[in-house]
Amino acid sequence: MIELLDYMQAQKKIVSEISPQEEVLRPNIDHLIKRIIEERRQEKRNTIMLVIPVLLVIVALFYFYTQN
C-alpha cells in the first residue's frame, strides 16, 4: 500500500513538472474504437472473400462427381 502511495505521489510530481505549454497526450478513445471496428470489418471481408471461392470449388467438384 505504501508503495502505491509513493508511486502516486511520484506521478503527481511528474505531471506537475510539465509546463502548461506541453500537453499530456492521451489516446482518443472514440478513434481507437473506430479503428477496432474497421479492423473487424476488414477481417470479415477477408474471411468472406476466402470462404466464397472455397465453397464454389466444393460445389463444382460435387456437381462434376455426381454427373459421372
Image: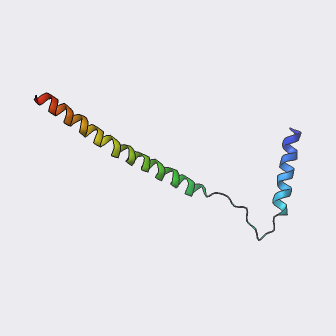
Would residue 63 appear left or right of 55 to someone viewing this image? Answer: left
Instruction: Name the image colouring.
Output: rainbow
- Residue at x 73%, y 61% (from the top left corner): 24
Would residue 20 appear left or right of 31 to someone viewing this image? Answer: right
The x and y percentages for residue 34 are 51, 55
In the picture, which quadrant includes the C terminus?
Answer: top left
Q: Quadrant of residue 56?
A: top left
- Residue at x 76%, y 71% (from the top left corner): 21
With respect to residue 37, does 55 lie above or below?
above
- Residue at x 54%, y 52% (from the top left corner): 33
Q: Observer-nearest residue: 66 or 8?
A: 66
How many marks are shown on the rendered structure? 0
The x and y percentages for residue 53 are 28, 42
The x and y percentages for residue 14 are 83, 57
Looking at the image, which residue sits at the far bottom?
21
- Residue at x 43%, y 46% (from the top left corner): 43
Q: Observer-nearest residue: 25 or 50?
A: 50
Looking at the image, which residue sits at the far left?
68
Would residue 32 appear left or right of 11 to someone viewing this image? Answer: left
Would residue 10 appear left or right of 38 to someone viewing this image? Answer: right
With respect to residue 33, does 59 lie above or below?
above
In the picture, which quadrant includes the N terminus?
Answer: top right
Q: Quadrant of residue 52?
A: top left
